[in-house]
Image (cartoon, rainbow, N blue to C red):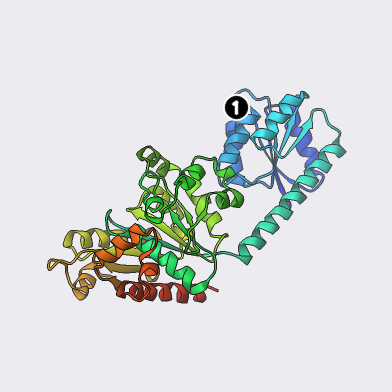
Amino acid sequence: MAEKILIIDDDLDTLRLVGLMLQRQGYQITAATNGQQGLEKALEEAPDLILLDVMMPDMDGYEVTRRLRANPQTVDIPILMFTAKTQLDDKVAGFEVGVDDYLTKPTHPSELQSHVKALLARNATSLEKAETVIHEQHGYVTGVIAARGGLGVSTLATNLSASLFKKVQADVILAELTPGQGSLALDLGFSTDRGLANLLGKPPVEITRNNVVEQLVTHDAGFKVLLASNHPRDFQLINQVSQYENVVARLATLGRFIVLDLGMGLPPFVQRILPLINELIVVVEGVPNTIVHTRALIEDLIEFGTNKNNIAAVLNNRSRSENLMPWAEVQEQLGHSLAGTLTPAPELFAQASRLNTPAVLCQPESQTTQQINKLVERITEHEAQTK
């Protein structure tokens, strides 16, 4: 199939002449006469290359490039800026906003053709390398979530990560995805908690594998952590949906197991990353209102496309109370089978918090550790089935 080139230029003569020149070389040509139309066509047509003018009346080429680079659907499309400007500063400005190559009008047909051919070849090589990396390593992603706060999502995610690392002795990454509500830095004894905020504050195009790696910290137990801050002002970052998608996609290439602390509910970022998650663990407590909310959460997850078989409900009774429902009754009212139960162990978790270590490592022979290990067995078995 012929490679498709989108030309964005308000000069109709340029559109006609350049388009005809490239068509004769076997390329498929589509055109736009202004910046907004170019952005729309880039999304609709998914071209292999964009040939972009700088000087346009409604939106200049620099702004068009910024918007293309900020959108995950167009972020990787090569851009050749084609302009009458010859000043070095103008070229530098183009490269700074994300342009891949630069030509000055007028240009000889053979020069244009060579630049187009080189850009297309370079992009094809990059895509091939990216596909190879993803094929070679794509970790098993487990999300931990609850219908409401205070049910022990972060604690369960932490202990799952520690047990997974102890079992497989391979890269395990715990990602706390709740900006402004982070607790793991304090629980695990880290001095910084800016990792997630630093990534969510970047344009999506700048969330690369290397940038994600730089924000990870390693716990003494061996697993790596992406920490969320506890500063309330950072809660606004929860709206950075495209950034979240890129963060999770990059994390999935960095470890064998990735455990996501998703917090509570179904904010837009959780809905967006659901297709990237292999398995969801939904935490519930044996309290009537919590069970009602959790049942609604599971129904919503299924409606958003999550396979029911990939949802594991875990009963976490954090305190000893006669008012808590028994396991069988919770399962019946929830309308979903329970994959595990965590019995109350407040003294153990208090000790673990004082020592800045997961409970499963604090008391390896405890009943809680055995219960966590059963969930780990489930996760590793499911991971093996995906290979």
**Nearer to us in this view, 107 or 175:** 175
Q: Where is residue 338 in the image (x, y as percent from the top left)?
A: 29, 72
Using the rendered image of the protein, determine whether residue 84 is visible from the camera's viewpoint.
Answer: no
| Left or right: where 316 falls relative to 119 | left
Residue kind at label 1, given as amino acid type: Met
* Residue at 32% across, 74% down: 366
Q: Name the residue under label 1.
A: 59
| Left or right: where 320 falls relative to 95 | left
* Residue at 62% across, 47% down: 46
Q: Is residue 57 above or below residue 380?
A: above
* Screen quadrant of the N terminus: bottom right
Using the rendered image of the protein, determine whether residue 229 is visible from the camera's viewpoint.
Answer: yes
Please state the total of marks drawn on the protein image. Answer: 1
Q: Is residue 275 above or below residue 115?
A: below
Q: Where is residue 91 in the image (x, y as percent from the top left)?
A: 73, 29
**Nearer to us in this view, 98 or 55:** 98
Disc 1 crowd rating (10 Å Cα; few below 14, some 14-19, many 20+) is few
| Left or right: where 203 falls relative to 338 | right
* Residue at 64% across, 34% down: 97
**Nearer to us in this view, 227 or 313:** 227
* Screen quadrant of the C terminus: bottom right
Q: Is mark 1 on a helix, strand or loop?
A: loop
Q: In which quarter of the image is residue 326?
A: bottom left
Q: Quadrant of residue 204?
A: top right
Q: Where is residue 84 in the image (x, y as percent from the top left)?
A: 76, 25
Q: Position of residue 312 (x, y in %)?
A: 35, 69
**Nearer to us in this view, 164 or 245:** 164
